[in-house]
Amino acid sequence: MQVTDTSDVWWKTAVVYCLDVETFYDLDGNGVGDLAGLAERIDYLAELGITCLWLMPFYPTPDRDDGYDIVDLYGVDPRLGNHGQLVEVLRTAHDRGINVIADLVVNHTSDRHPWFKAARRSTDNPFRDYYVWRDTEPPDTSGSVVFPDQEDSIWELDERTGEWYLHHFYKHQPDLNLANPKVVEEILRVVGFWLELGFDGFRVDGIPFLKQTVDDGGDPDLVVDPHDLVRRIRAFLNRRAGHAMMLGEVNLPHAQQLEFFGGEAGNELHMQFDFIGMQATYLALAREDAAPLVEALQARPPIHPTCQWATFLRNHDELTLDKLSEDERQEVFAAFGPDPEMQLFGRGLKRRVPPMMGGDPRRVRMAYSLLFTLPGTPTLYYGEEIGMGEDPAAEGRMAVRTPMQWTPGRNGGFSQAAPGRLVQRVVPDGYGPAHVNVADQRRAPDSLWSFMRTLIGTYRMCPELGWGEFSVVEQAEGRVLAHRCDLDDVALVAVHNLGADPVVVDLVVDGFDDTRELVDLLHDQEVATSDGSVEVSLEGYGFRWYRLRPRGGLHLP
C-alpha cells in the first residue's frame, strides 16, 4: 500500500465525529444550536483531530423524530440557518482538512411533506404512488414495528381516502414507494444536489427498511430489492463525485452485511457500522472476558479492499443489544443499565459510556483505547471526547441528545438563552457542565479530552489499523485482548486488560528481528527485547499500543 492510498480511499482511516447542529452550539442565543455556531466550532474539531464530520438531519422538519421526519429533502431548517451558512460550514471544514457527510433519509418522509399531503387528497392524485398503499385491512404486523412502545402496526388508516399507508417507523413517517421510478429519480436528484453543494458523502439511514416485500402485507407485485437501489445510488455517486462515500446503517447478520458491501465487487456501500462488534464489546466488558469480542472480530467476513467497517461505542440512538441472546443481553443490562428506566425497547440502553462504566476513568479510557485499535474506522458521538453523561429524565433516545457542554457556566456555554428556552435541558448533577466541559479539559494535559486527542493523533499515524490484516495474539489471560494489525512492513500490537485487577502477560511479537524495532507508542519509548518476547504488566483496565516497524528513518510516530 502507498501512503497516497489513504487519501484516495480516505474513509478507511478517517476519524468520524457525529453531531446534531441543534444541540452543538447556539450562536444567536435563541436556545437552538445553529449552523453559524457550528462554523465557529470547526477549529475545535480540527484541533481534536477528527477528519470526517457527520451531520445529523438539518432539513426542515416538524421535529417529531428529532429531525428524521423531513418535509423538504433539499432544504435547511430555518431554525438552524440557511444554505449560505451551510456552505460556510462546508467551506471552513474543507479548509481544515475535514470531510463532511450528511444523513440521507430515503426510507420515509414526514406526513407533512408536500408529496404526502398531495398523495392523501385522493386515490388518483399524481403523488399517490410516491407512497405505499393498500385498500384492504392489513394483517397483524406488530412484530415488524421499529418502536414497539409507540406503534402496534406498520400500516395506518388514512381516514380521508379509506386506505392504509405503510410506515416502518412512526405513523407520521410514511414509507416512500421505492418501486416507483419517479421516487428513485428524485432520490438521485437529492444526492446530486448535496454533492454539488459540497458534501463528501452520506450516512444512509435504515438500510434494511429499504426492502419492501409481500411480508409487509402490501401488494405482492410491489417488491423492492434494496441492493438494486443501493447499487444505483452508488453508481450515481461515483459519477458525480468520485471521492464521495456512503456509510450505511445496517444492523444485520454478517452474511447480509457482506451483501450490502456488494460482495466481491464492492459496489454497494463503502462503509457499514459494526453493530455486531459493538454489542460483543459490551458483553466482553461486562464479563471482563475478551472471548465475545474475539469471536465477533474473527467472524467478520472479508470485504472488498476499498470497503470498511465503522467501529463505535456510542451513537445517537439507543445502545442496541438486539444481536445478543436474551441471556447475554441481561448480562449487559445488569452490568451497565440495571434499572428499567435506563433501558429502551427491551433491547437497548439510553446511557452514555462514562456513567455505564461507573465513572471509573481507567475503564473509560481503556474502552476508548480499545475502540481506536479495533480494525476499522472509529466513529465518535459528540461529547464523547469529554466524557459527557446522559439526562436520565429525558424521554427515550433523547437522553443522549443533550446540549454540548463547552464551559462550566450557565447552559454549559451552549447558549445564552434562558434555560427554559433550550432545545433540550443540559445534563444535570454529576455529569453536568460544572464537572464535565471542554474549557476545563482543554487546559488539562491529563484530561479525557487530551487523552482522546492523543488517541486520535496516534490512530491517524497508523494506517495499518484501517488497512491491515487483523489477527489475535495468543496469550494465557482470558480477560486480556491482545491483537495486531499488519500492513506491509509495520504492525500495530494492542493489549487491553478488560478486568479490574492487574495482570502480567507474556507476549511473543512475531516478525521481530535485528532490522525492526518495537515501540510503545503511547509512552514514546522503545521496548527492550532481543527476540520479540515482551512481559507486559497491565494495571486494572490497563492497555498498551506497540508498533513493530523498521529501524532507522523518520517514523511518525
Image (spheres, helix red, strand yellow):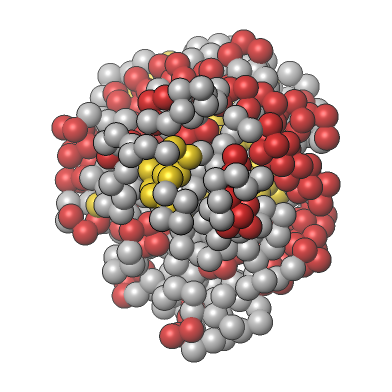
> Which of the two residues, 467 or 484, is positioned nearer the viewer here?
467
Whole-percent x, y for residue 263 in the image = 58, 14
> Does 393 appear above or below 145?
below
Where is the N terminus found, in terms of image quarters? top right
Residue 360 in sight here: no
**Residue at the spot 47% in from the left edge and 51% down from the top edge:** 161
**Residue at the spot 57% in from the left edge and 37% down from the top edge:** 177
**Residue at the spot 81% in from the left edge and 66% down from the top edge:** 84
> Does 348 appear above or below 432?
above
Residue 156 in sight here: yes
**Residue at the spot 26% in from the left edge and 36% down from the top edge:** 140
Instruction: Tell me if 553 is positioned left or right of 383 in this view.
Output: right
Whole-percent x, y for residue 456 in the image = 59, 45
> Does 203 appear above or below 475?
below
Instruction: Tell me if 423 is positioned left or right of 359 in this view.
Output: right
Q: Quadrant of residue 425?
A: bottom left
> Does 95 appear above or below 484?
below
Whole-percent x, y for residue 510 in the image = 50, 12
Instruction: Tell me if 70 is positioned left or right of 255 in this view.
Output: right
Instruction: Tell me if 327 is positioned left or right of 482 in this view.
Output: left
Where is the C terminus found, in terms of image quarters? top right
Task: Report the label total.
Answer: 0
> Which of the two residues, 365 or 544, is positioned nearer the viewer here?
365
Whole-percent x, y for residue 128 in the image = 59, 44
> Which of the two residues, 78 or 12, is positioned nearer the viewer here?
78
Q: Residue furthest bottom?
A: 418
